[in-house]
Image (tube, helix red, strand yellow):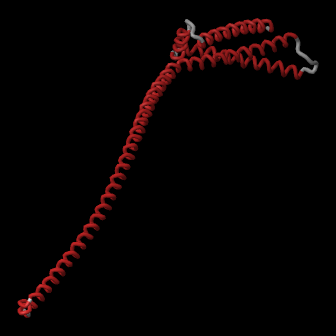
Amino acid sequence: MVQLLLILGQGLVYLLYALIFSEMVLIMTLLFDAPMTKTAILELDSLKLNQGKGLLIVKIVTGTLFLVLMANFYSLLRITMKNRTNEGGGLNPTEEVLKSMNILQISLIGIVLFLVLMIDSLHHYIRGLPSLVMAMEAAKTQNQSFRKEKTESVQKLNTMVQEKDTLRTKLKYLESECESEANEANKARAEADALRQESEGFLKEYDRLLADNQNFRNQSKLVEQRFTKQSISHPNDKKNL
């Protein structure tokens, strides 16, 4: 019985090694761009999408491996408990071989299950890679359009800054012209005030001269009247003369 268990265990170990090697080859095929990569992806797609035969085979294999794993755990636990209860100490060679076989099978089954999870994760990421590439291309296109809009915005901003500088220069020129015209207007206003004051002085002088002329005329009339009166009152004196 023990020899049969050892033979079956050895055959299972060989089978697990072959399964691990196959899984590693499949992982390498998925990781690198090999000629069989597309075929492997299509086979995995059909295995996942086919809810009948393929999924049933995967469940049977997984269940079998899980049962074998539990059986090895139970056998290892039984041998360990027997070693603890055996006060004579030590295990016989057959039990040592069985314990080593159980540990090896548990390790190999754990590696097989781990590789299965890795294959499933790789397949999931590879199937999602095209959509990710499309999303990256869309983001790249959007980024390029954003950069283009940013460049156009910068150019418009530079144009607006140049226009602002030009308008500022024109504004300074107009301000200087307004200041010069204001100065000229003030100067003209001052000259007009001076001319007005001078004309007012001329008018006052003219009025004074008119008044003096009128006074002179009045005095001339008085002198003429006096002379006329004297001529009339003393005619004989003129004759004597």
User: Considering depth in this image, is 128 or 111 the residue closer to the camera?
Assistant: 128
Q: Quadrant of residue 87?
A: top right
Residue 88 lies, in percent from the top left, at: 94, 18
Q: Is residue 143 left or right of residue 232?
A: right
Q: Is residue 113 left or right of residue 208?
A: right
Instruction: Answer yes or no: is residue 22 visible.
Output: yes
Q: Which quadrant would the C terminus be assigned to in this image? A: bottom left
Residue 5 lies, in percent from the top left, at: 77, 9
Above or below for 240 versus 175: below
Above or below for 172 versus 227: above
Q: Quadrant of residue 124?
A: top right
Instruction: Answer yes or no: is residue 232 visible.
Output: no
Q: Is residue 106 left or right of residue 50?
A: right
**Total numbered labels:** 0
Residue drawn 68% across the image and 7% down it: 18
Above or below for 176 versus 36: below
Q: Is residue 31 left or right of residue 100?
A: left
User: Considering depth in this image, is 13 or 140 the residue closer to the camera?
Assistant: 140
Q: Which quadrant would the N terminus be assigned to in this image? A: top right
Residue drawn 23% across the image and 71% down it: 203
Residue 125 lies, in percent from the top left, at: 56, 20
